[in-house]
Image: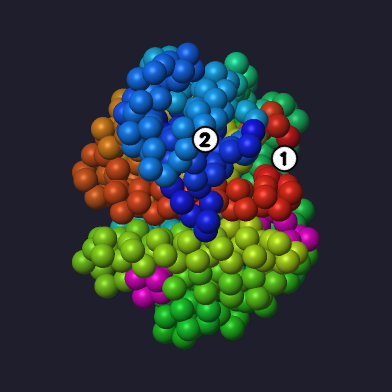
Amino acid sequence: MKHVKTLNTQTLNNTVKKSGCGECQTSCQSACKTSCTVGNQTCEQKR
Amino acid sequence: MIHQYKNNGYNIVLDVNSGSVHVMDDLCYDVTEVLDRQYGELASESLSSPEISGILERELGSTYKKEELEEALLEIAELVKAGQLFTKDAFAGMVQMVKEHKTVVKALCLHIAHDCNLACKYCFAEEGEYHGRRALMSYEVGRKALDFLIANSGNRHNLEVDFFGGEPLMNWQVVKDLVAYGRAQEKLYNKRFRFTVTTNGVLLNDEIQEFINQEMDNVVLSLDGRKEINDRMRPFRNGKGSYDLIVPKFQKLAESRNQQKYYIRGTFTRENLDFAEDILHFADLGFQQMSMEPVVGDESDPYAIRREDLPAIMKEYDRLAKIMVEREKSGKGFQFFHFMIDLDGGPCVVKRLSGCGSGTEYLAVTPWGDLYPCHQFVGQEEFLMGNVDDGIVKPEIADEFRSLSVYSKESCKNCFAKFYCSGGCMANSYHFHGTLQDTYETGCEMERKRVECAIMIKAALAEQGKEVYHEEK
């Protein structure tokens, strides 16, 4: 495309199929403890 | 839903429902803005209609030629067709199913010590005592907590246990004994414990460092940044600052872990709204993994963040993001927890709809074995869910937490960041509004800015041909 650069190849919809295994890290266990930051977690299945 | 904004010279368009992020030139950016304002959701076929061409010519005809507008429409139609722009919300119907799904407990925050050797002014744990008495967790209580976790974790293989406080190093022998107990159970139950510890570093020594490096998946090191900032908020009980004692220990620990699997974690208050300086100070000290949280407290507290502070905080996040791009380009990059975003390999939809997991997947355990939805609810009797002997005796509390999502909270419905924060911190909602079904708006505004900055950094690095996702080490 000439006018648009898309940064990601996956859409949220693409994650539905393999969704919910629950093996990922709990968000508050990482480094926050006083807020909620889910979007920066990594999917365990991608590792 | 579309969210578009300009930051550091980039025109960024986030298609909220698909999570797609586009960097556009002015032409496409302006056309997208008109289409969003006029229609909100669009099918690719409708983009070729004379009505749309007419609207664009009327609104943008003085800036762009007709052929340019047609060219932009073609590219936008392609994105719409690929499900990357103007997508409909496909998850509202899914949330009920996610919420009805039976959850298991997979993480515990063990309050190994309700005591602390520092007297940090902003501590939500009130110098480690959590509105209660000083206490250390016994090995027996800790062992029962691990048994409870194993028994309630269903098929989950990976279990997390955070040794938290107060200051967990004040009860170190119990930490070591519980790690040994956990490791022994792993083989018996086909589980893997990921232990973490959060410490102020006062009691850190070589022996403890070695144990941490051997056993802890992550370690969170509390320090607020520049010496004068840290020492003002994080003094010893006699008033003396903690910086000089702690910094060399933390530097040594970070190096001994090859600058991986740790966070140097600070808290900023309204007394250091130039907190980017503290993050850069961490970098100058050689740290590479950092976190800096806004303090949460009632606006009557002198150091609490007030709404009037937000413009300065927004400016500071923007400034930090720009500096991080420059540092990354010059090979001196570092990780800032709150700007980390994984556009391709991030959490699945179920996780984004489930929220932080407090009260369901994640529980806090007090030194005497009581169970609470998370560390921030400890000491509030209305949230006492059970104990390590009897398990969950008030499942209705878990049910209430399970029912919460970005679709149950009115204030989340039209927020572009809802799939990144997943509804925000339940404790903040409760503390500010007396209900779990709300949000802490000051925190939300900061979160939205952090998401914007995180995406801008991705855009800048993608332009440089650098790795778009800087994976957490």
- Between disc 1 and disc 2, the foreground one is 2
Q: Quadrant of the N terminus of chain A?
A: top right
Q: In this rendered view, identify the residue nearer to me: B306 or B461.
A: B461
Q: Viewed as shown, does residue B328 lie left or right of B10?
A: right
The residue that appears at 43% across and 52% down in the rendered structure is B449
Rendered image coloring scheme? rainbow
Closer to the N terminus: mark 1 or mark 2?
2
Q: In this rendered view, identify the residue nearer to me: B109 or B409.
A: B409
> For the residue carrying disc 1, how many other residues have a C-alpha within 10 Å: few (<14), some (14-19), or many (20+)?
some
Q: Viewed as shown, does residue A27 lie left or right of B208?
A: left
Image position, residue B21 (x, y; %):
55, 37
The residue that appears at 60% across and 81% down in the rendered structure is B245
From which residue to which does the magenta span run?
B257-273
Q: Which mark is residue B68?
A: 2
> For the residue carrying disc 2, how many other residues have a C-alpha within 10 Å: few (<14), some (14-19), or many (20+)?
few
Q: Which mark is residue B203?
A: none
The residue that appears at 60% across and 16% down in the rendered structure is A17
Amino acid beneath label 2: Glu
Q: Which mark is residue B183?
A: 1
Image position, residue B349 (x, y; %):
52, 26
What is the chain letter for disc 1?
B
Q: Cα distance, mark 1 to mark 2?
A: 64 Å
